[in-house]
Image (tube, rainbow, N blue to C red):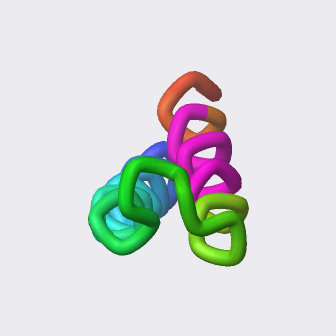
Amino acid sequence: MAWVLFLLAGLFETLWAIGLKHSDGFSRPLVAIPTVAAMAVSLGCSASR
């Protein structure tokens, strides 16, 4: 189970990095909102045991 969470955290880490590029510094809200959500999921997966 830990490996699954680790892989999910890596996947969402990649997604928010791409979203950060496309949100133009959070100035495009339709892209910034999913980017922040991907950040939260990534941190949540990496913080859980």
Q: Is residue 21 magenta?
A: no
Q: Quadrant of the C terminus?
A: top right
The quadrant where residue 7 appears? bottom left
Residue 15 visible, this orientation: yes
Q: Residue 46 appears at what percent x and percent y? A: 48, 33
Q: Quadrant of residue 15?
A: bottom left
* Front-most of residues 11 and 48: 11
Out of 22 and 9, give the one closest to the viewer.
22
Residue 20 in picture, x, y percent from top left: 37, 57
- Tag count in the figure? 0
Please tell me whether the stretch drawn in magenta is mainly helix, strand or loop: helix
Query: Against 30, is 23 above or below?
Result: above
The location of residue 30, given as percent across then percent down, is 70, 76
Residue drawn at the location 36% of the way across and 73% of the way down:
22
- Left or right of 22? Residue 46 is right
Farthest residue in the front direction? 27
Against 48, residue 40 (above or below) is below
The x and y percentages for residue 38 are 58, 57
The residue that appears at 65% across and 41% down in the rendered structure is 40
Is 43 left, or right, of 9 in this rendering? Answer: right
Q: Which residues are magenta?
A: 35-43
**Does the image show residue 7?**
no
**30 to 26, vertically: above or below:** below
